[in-house]
Image: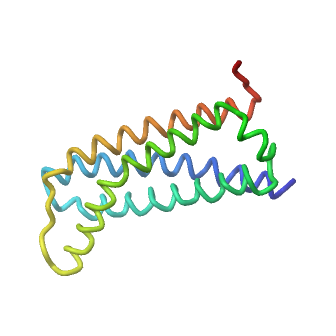
Amino acid sequence: MLAHWFLAAIHLLAFATGFAAVLARGAALRRVAVSPTETRNVLLSDNVWGISAATLLVTGGIRAFGGYEKGMDYYLHQPLFHLKMTLFVIILLLEIAPMVALVKWRIALSRGRSIDVRRATLFARISHIEALLIIGMVVAATGMARGVVFG
């Protein structure tokens, strides 16, 4: 029982941390478009966002398919689970361009080169869309936790 509670708590904390980190990254990206001195805040927020997303994936996978919670059959037949996973996949797809660009920023900075901030505003917008999608995931998750069934 404690393992169930622990996994659920870590999963929920990862949602909260990821939400805050992706919002902070978006805000820092808006500022870096004006002043590249904000780069450190962008990269720090991006690190936290990445760790949170990985934590969501691992804890969610363990909870859904590792014999915890309601069991694999429940999740695979629950429309809200499919919605939650669809939102997660959309987030992952949206994340490709910012992730590639920020990896390039890290490489450039490690080599003492300047970074290309021309798409920072776009990446800020993507970050804020991802934050909205995280909210959608939380709404779907709370519906699943309450046993909401459609159809």
Q: Quadrant of residue 84?
A: top right
In this rendering, is residue 120 above or below 139?
Answer: below
Q: Is residue 10 left or right of residue 2?
A: left
Seen at 60% across and 50% down, the residue is: 13
Q: Quadrant of residue 7?
A: bottom right
In this rendering, is residue 103 above or below 28?
Answer: below
Percent coordinates x, y for residue 147 in the rendering: 77, 29
Percent coordinates x, y for residue 39 in the rendering: 24, 62
Percent coordinates x, y for residue 31 in the rendering: 20, 49
Residue situated in front as seen by the camera: 104 or 82 = 82
Seen at 81% across and 54% down, the residue is: 67
Q: Residue furthest right?
A: 1
Q: Is residue 87 left or right of residue 27?
A: right
Seen at 32% across and 43% down, the residue is: 126
Q: Is residue 143 left or right of residue 5?
A: left
Q: Residue furthest top?
A: 151
